Amino acid sequence: MSPFPKEFGGAGLCDPALHNELCTILRLLGSADLSVARIYEGHVNAVSLLARYGHRDQMQALSGHVANGGLSAVWGADDAEGLHVIDGNPRVLRGRKILASGAGFVTDPIVTAVAEGSQIMCLLHLTDQKVDLSGWTAQGMRSTATGAIDLSGTVISSNNVVGVAGDFMRQPHFSGGAWRFCAAHTGAIERLVDLFRDHLVARGRGGDPYQQERLAQCIASAKTARQWVEEAARRLSTDEPGSINVVAFANLTRMVTERCALDVMEAVQRGVGLTSFVRPHPIERISRDLATYLRQPVPDLAMSDGAKAFLDSRLSVGDF
Ligand SMILES: Cc1cc2nc3c(=O)[nH]c(=O)nc-3n(C[C@H](O)[C@H](O)[C@H](O)COP(=O)(O)OP(=O)(O)OC[C@H]3O[C@@H](n4cnc5c(N)ncnc54)[C@H](O)[C@@H]3O)c2cc1C
């Protein structure tokens, strides 16, 4: 399951050629525990960014830390002040990151920061962490330990800087990589549908036509989400010309996966009833985590970008 290239002791899962295998792993993790899937996805994202934009020495250093029990992540979210690289001797960070998953136990995150007015990425090795998890009172995903971390005073040398300014948001990978969290969401959707079926069988309620209709809709939603996610992963892996379509497809995949997840949660909660809200029933935990993890940045913009790309395209929708 390691994303590191094989020469650094991993399974090479950061290689786009293995997107299909990575998609399966993310789905399976998502079906088991979305918090674990989130932490793993962040680690994969960091290693993938390093493979794409970083130096060999940085990959060597990170793989060494991970072999000793370390973990990486990508912390991009900022508060109003943001995180800045302050020039001086030495250069240091000033500010904090927010909504940082794994705050307190991730040892080697990639953080975005502003240096001379541009966004850069820094790979850090944290030994002493000033973490604040007090604000992480979300409905679900509590075990991701998503919180704020003050990075002021962290020394930054050229060894820390990954790639060049602007690499973090470079397309098609910035938006196209959304397929990974959609894969985790899809795993949770699939698990909910399986649990719904198990409930109907166990309670002898599967013969009811209303329940059968609900189940049929759930099966269709789960299969729809999976097909979109696998296609989004495949498109990004081929890196074929026409990256606008890759980004648009990933953005539309976000919309489709979210809709499928919301439809399945509604149908399963209605079909199972009160039991699905009572702990420790797994439907209760999965629905709580999924509802929370579905909240990703700018969903309206992602959806409308997909529509705009098609408006600007001369392709038939069948070829888009
Ligand atoms: C479990 C979990 C773990 C996370 N871990 C990390 C992490 O490790 N690293 C990290 O960097 N981030 C992390 N995040 C944060 C995540 O990447 C997003 O930043 C966050 O979830 C955005 O949520 P939001 O609903 O506030 O988004 P928003 O983008 O604020 O969207 C909320 C709504 O407002 C709309 N909207 C957005 N902008 C505008 C606008 N300008 N005008 C009008 N409407 C607008 C959107 O379309 C949407 O309807 C995590 C989030 C979760 C849930």
Image (cartoon, rainbow, N blue to C red):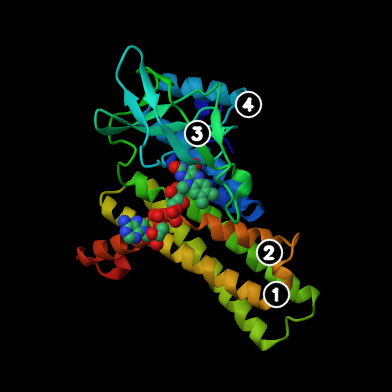
Dot 1 or dot 4, earlier in sequence: 4
Please identify the residue farthest to the bottom as the structure is shown.
209
Q: Does the beta carbon of the residue at mark 3 sit less than 8 Å from ligand 1?
A: no
Q: What residue did someone put label 3 on? A: 149
Cβ atoms under marks 3 and 4 closer than 8 Å: no
Cβ atoms under marks 2 and 1 closer than 8 Å: yes
Q: Residue at x 30, y 41 (%)?
A: 170
Q: What residue did someone put label 4 on? A: 69
Dot 2 or dot 4, earlier in sequence: 4
- Numbered mark located on residue 226 in the image: none
117 vs 203, left or right, is: left
Q: CA distance from mark 2 to mark 3?
A: 32 Å
Q: Position of residue 167 (x, y in %)?
A: 31, 36
Q: CA distance from mark 2 to mark 4?
A: 32 Å
Cβ atoms under marks 1 and 4 closer than 8 Å: no
Query: Toward the viewer: 51 or 15?
Result: 51
29 vs 149, left or right, is: right
Q: What residue did someone put label 1 on? A: 272
Query: Toward the viewer: 2 or 292?
Result: 292
Tell me the quarter of the picture where residue 90 sits. Answer: top left
| Crowd band around label 3 with a 10 angstrom C-alpha radius: few (<14), some (14–19), many (20+) | many
Q: Amino acid at mark 4?
A: Gly
